[in-house]
Amino acid sequence: MTGFGKAQVSLGTKQVSVDIRALNSKQFDLNLRVPGLFRSREAEMRQQIASVLERGKIDCFIVVKQASGNVEINEELLKRRFMRMKILAQSLDAATNELLPALLSLPDAFVEDEEELAESDWILFQSALGAALEHADAFRKQEGQGLETELLLRVENITKNLGEVAVFDAERAESMRGKLTQRMEQMSVEFDRNRFEEELIYYLEKLDISEEKQRLNAHCTHFKEAMQEKASNGRKLGFIAQEMGREINTIGSKANHAGIQKLVVLMKDELEKIKEQLNNIV
């Protein structure tokens, strides 16, 4: 699920802002950009972010603005880059009067006095990071409520179609028995009716879908129960959906009935919509 969070905190003369953006992804993929002041704490920050967001493509940007202090231009670095960019501009017959603004916009164009992050400042920053994560997670939960309604609707539709399969299933057995008996009688040959009944029962048992219907109904119930659990169950719901798909496919392969096949197609369509939405769930 998508989520956005932002927080700011003042650390002495510095103003630190935290921006978090979470997009849909099956794995936890964190892109964390931190200034030099926080580099030694990067591992702890990654752990804090992962403990809250757990899953998704996460972008986290931390920006430090110095209200006051000694800030100098990184002259040697800018000179080297200017000469390279000037040569490139001349080879492309491009103007060079805009190179300086571009150089000054680079993140390492200025050099600040090196200093260590105080433990008290780190505790304050953790609070700001936690607030940004809380906002992003709240955004996700709000989106999740809409997804919950959508998923429950799809599961109920599968359960409803499964109930209609039961009606066709009873009709199917009698219809198949009548057709096979009629064909044997039309052949005008003598046959052992007891043996025919035995073979007919064996044939109908191979096409029986009672167990598949029972398991599919159980999977639908399990799916709804898993949605109510407090733990993150995106992967678990995905596994249950896979099992639902297996039972629906088996019912379709055994159906041998136009009405049941139509219902199987409808159930597959609902299941695909469920799988699409599960990609958005933590």
Image: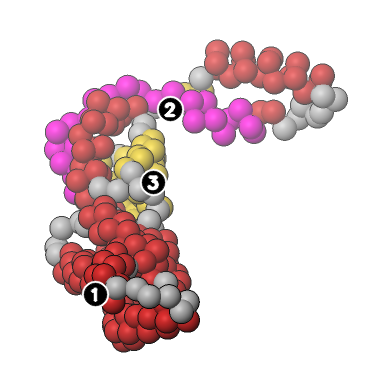
Applied colour scheme: secondary structure
Where is residue 98 drawn, in percent x and y? 72, 32
Which residue sits at x=68%, y=15%?
84
Which residue sits at x=58%, y=19%?
78
User: Element type at marker 1?
Assistant: helix
Taking depth in this image into account, of 264 and 234 the one nearest to the observer is: 264
Total count of labels: 3
Q: Which residues are magenta?
A: 101-127
User: Element type at marker 2?
Assistant: strand
User: Element type at marker 3?
Assistant: strand
Which residue sits at x=46%, y=79%?
188
Q: Of the residues tagged 1 and 3, which is closer to the observer?
A: 1
- Circle 3 sits on which residue? 57
Q: Amino acid at mark 1?
A: Asn
In the image: residue 46, left or right of residue 76: left
Q: Quadrant of the N terminus?
A: bottom left
- Circle 2 sits on which residue? 71
Where is residue 247 drawn, in percent x and y? 30, 63
Where is residue 58 drawn, in percent x and y? 37, 46
